[in-house]
Image (cartoon, helix red, strand yellow):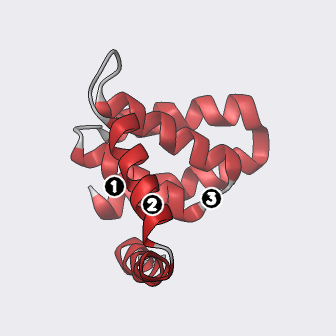
Amino acid sequence: MDWQTALNETTDLTKDFRKAHPEAAKAFTQMHHAALSDGALSTKDKELQCVAIGIATRCVDCIGFHVHGAAKAGATRDEIVETIATCIMMGGGPSYMYGVKALEAFDQLA
């Protein structure tokens, strides 16, 4: 999968929604920034949590965006691998399959 192309396509789709319902889109963006800003947990740790939730919920777009965010926040490949391992322990085979997608995304986007 070409992760950058996939993320660009999803971003274009979100732009269409932003035009259709700007208030909802703005509110989501504000929540996103508030939730992921540094606090008791670092942005990197929060992005890794988002990667795990993306894997657990089988959301390919969430995996891509949050792997990219984790890398930008300083996450290493080893941290992504350990996040995936934890997901596999909790979610079994489906988490394994989506976890390897997350690792592919990291290798392309980091």
Label 2: state its secondary structure: helix
- Report the Cα–Cα distance between label 1 and label 2: 6 Å
Q: Are marks 3 and 1 in contact (CB under 8 Å)?
A: no
Q: In this view, does 94 lie to the left or right of 104?
A: right
Identify the image quadrant of residue 9: bottom left
Label 1: state its secondary structure: helix
In the picture shown, does residue 31 fall above or below 109?
above
**Of 45 and 36, the residue lying toward us:** 36
**Of 13 and 101, the residue lying toward us:** 13
Mark 3 or mark 1, which has the lower sequence index? 3
In the picture shown, does residue 61 fall above or below 30?
below
Q: What is the x, y in percent for residue 92?
A: 77, 39
The amino acid sitting under disc 3 is Cys
Q: Do the residues labelled 1 and 2 touch (CB within 8 Å)?
A: yes
Which residue in the structure is indicated by mark 3?
A: 59
In the picture shown, does residue 2 fall above or below 101?
below
Which residue in the structure is indicated by mark 2?
A: 64
Which residue in the structure is indicated by mark 1?
A: 68
Label ID, residue 106: none
Label 3: state its secondary structure: loop
